Amino acid sequence: MVQVVGAREVEPKQLKAFFQLEEVQDRAFFPEWVEDLPELGDRERDFLNQVEAGYFNFLQSPPLLEKTIQLSVVSPILFLAGCFLPPFKVITEESIEIFDADGDFIVRGSIDILLLRDDLWLAIIESKKASFSVEAGLPQLLCYMLAQPEPERPSFGVLMTGGEFLFVKLVNGEAPRYATSTLFALRNKRNRDIYDAFSVLKQLMQL
């Protein structure tokens, strides 16, 4: 009997059982979020300061829902990164469907934001409301990354809750493998994590 689930409901154990998806702990697997990150200019830092201030302002009037996150955090960051200009293209609500090898397990969903360059999937962005855990959203993002139409290419994704950013890399082979970056959090007062997260996004766009 064929089982169909929505990407929002899929569980990590199902991705492992039906798609043999494995997490990699070796940091050498995902160097793109650490090495040779681009420096930010003063204009970029000033703009990101405003995005951060706007996010904390919205927190004063909960609930901070998914659409609000997209408007107040995701869209400004993509604008600043030049994602709305050639050669990049942004598609929203892209439907996907993935099957296990036997066709007995199907996952269906809709990608919040798909970033393309020359019609190649460059990054998949999934945004969540502020109260949402990135751990809860990670299986959903991985489903979308598994749907990448060119499996010989690595897939990159970012999960944004407004206050947190998590980058993910997935590589297909005999079995798909993935790794995550550190969790960038706007509440981190020691570093300006919004600067670092933006640098990682720029790096992925340049690959």
Image: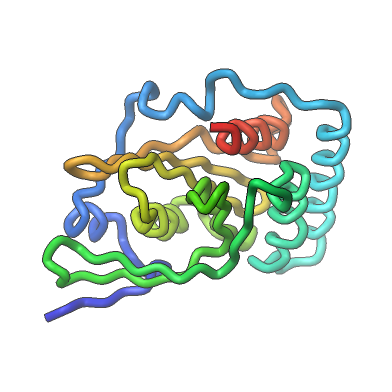
Q: Which one is nearer the viewer's eye here, 104 or 135?
A: 104
Q: Please name the residue shown 47% across and 43% down the image.
A: 156
Q: Nearer the viewer, residue 151 or 36?
A: 151
Color style of the picture? rainbow
Residue 192: x, y in percent?
A: 73, 30
Residue at (72% x, 65% y) in the render: 68
Residue found at the very far bottom of the displayed protein: 1
Above-or-below relation of 190 to 118 = above
Q: Is residue 204 above or below residue 105?
A: above
Residue 9 placement (x, y as % from top left): 37, 69
Total numbered badges shown on the rendered structure: 0
Question: In the picture, residue 64 is in which quadrant?
Answer: bottom right
58 sits to left or right of 6: right
Give the vertical position of 27 relative to 123 (above or below): above
Residue nearest the viewer, comparing 39 with 59: 39
Residue 148 in percent (x, y) is at: 39, 54
- What residue do we see at 24% from left, 56% from top? 13
Q: Quadrant of residue 204?
A: top right
Relative placement, left or right, of 191 versus 174 is right
Q: Nearer the viewer, residue 100 or 190?
A: 100
Left or right of residue 27, residue 94 in this image: right
Q: Quadrant of the N terminus?
A: bottom left
> Residue at point 73% right, 49% down?
85
In the shown orientation, is residue 17 left or right of residue 76?
A: left
Q: Residue furthest top?
A: 36
> In this orientation, does residue 171 appear?
yes
Looking at the image, can residue 128 be seen? no
State the image coordinates of residue 122 (x, y, percent, origin top left). Answer: 52, 46
